[in-house]
Structures are given as C-alpha cells and as structure tokens.
C-alpha cells in the first residue's frame, strides 16, 4: 500500500508528513476487513484534506506482496467529504477487476503504456 500511494499522494500536493497519516489510515481500514477478493485487492480509505481521489496500481503475476494472490492491487484514498465519489470509484473498480478476462489482460500487459491504454479503453 505504501509503495503504491506515496508518490501519487506527493504528486497530488499532499505534504510528506500527511502522506504517512494517509497511508496509515488505509492500513487501519484494511485491518478492519480485508479488501482482497481473489486475484485483486482494493485497499482504500477516506481522509480529510485530500484534494481528490488518489490511487496507485500494482500488478505482479506472481503476487503483489507474496506468492499467488492478490496479483493486482488498486490502493486509493478520497476526500472525507466525498463519500459518494468514493463509493462510485470503489464500485466501478470492484466491478471492473471482478472480470477474470480483464484481470488476465492486465496481467498480460508488458509495459506501463500497454496497461494505461487498457485502463483508458475500459474506462471508456
């Protein structure tokens, strides 16, 4: 989670001190109930002072943080004040990554550019 979120949060203008707080919030949320579902995981949290939804995607056919599962992890945070946006993003991501053929296409992407093109095509 830390590896997926630190740089996107910094790029979004979140101060380094706040980045650690945000990552800890995602990790605490994950402790209350795992977001792993088969080959993917969606660790997430809402946090005050975030400028918008900030996400990081990790893909590894052998497992993102260990052997086998999950192989795709989309970690994200959203503003505390944007509950509706948070739920829509979570719902769309869960629906998208629940499709086994989509996950296989993600895992088959050989470059960052291929992966981004796939995501852009899927997002519509």
Image (cartoon, grey):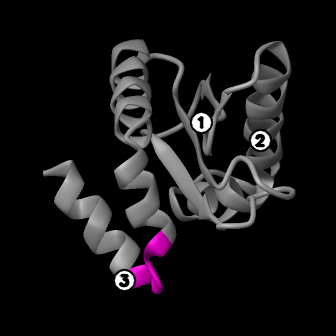
Separation (CA) of disc 3 from disc 1: 22 Å
* Closer to the camera in the image, 21 or 90: 90
* SS class, disc 1: loop
In x, y percent, where is residue 109? 43, 77
Compute the Cα span from label 1 to label 2. Answer: 13 Å
Q: CA distance from mark 3 to mark 2?
A: 26 Å
- Earlier residue among tags 3 and 1: 1
Q: What residue occupies the far left of the structure in this picture?
A: 124
Instruction: Please state which of the two labelled residues, at mark 3 or mark 2, is closer to the viewer.
Output: 3
Mark 2 crowd level (few <14, some 14–19, many ≥20, 10 Å Cα): many
Q: Which residue is mark 2?
A: 23
Q: Which residue is mark 3?
A: 113
**Crowd class of label 3 (few under 14; some 14 to 19; many from 20; radius 10 Å):** few
- Comparing labels 1 and 2, the label whose residue is closer to the camera: 1
31 vs 14, nearest the viewer: 31
Which residue is pictured at 67% across the width and 27% down the height?
A: 35
Quarter assignment of residue 10:
bottom right
Q: Which residues are magenta?
A: 108-113
Is residue 99 one of those drawn in magenta? Answer: no
Residue designated by label 1: 42
Q: Residues within 10 Å of mark 1 (few under 14, many from 20)?
A: many
């Amino acid at each position: 989670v830390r590896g997926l979120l630190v740089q996107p949060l910094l790029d979004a203008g979140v101060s380094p001190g706040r980045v650690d707080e945000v990552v800890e919030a995602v990790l605490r949320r994950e402790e209350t109930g795992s977001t792993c579902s088969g080959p993917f995981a969606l660790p997430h949290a809402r946090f005050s002072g975030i400028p918008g939804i900030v996400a990081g995607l990790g893909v590894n056919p052998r497992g993102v943080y260990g052997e086998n599962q999950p192989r795709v992890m989309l970690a994200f945070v959203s503003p505390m004040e944007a509950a509706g946006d948070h739920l829509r993003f979570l719902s769309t991501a869960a629906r998208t990554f629940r499709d086994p053929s989509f996950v296989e296409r993600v895992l088959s992407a050989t470059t960052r550019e291929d992966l981004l093109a796939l995501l852009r095509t899927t997002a519509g």
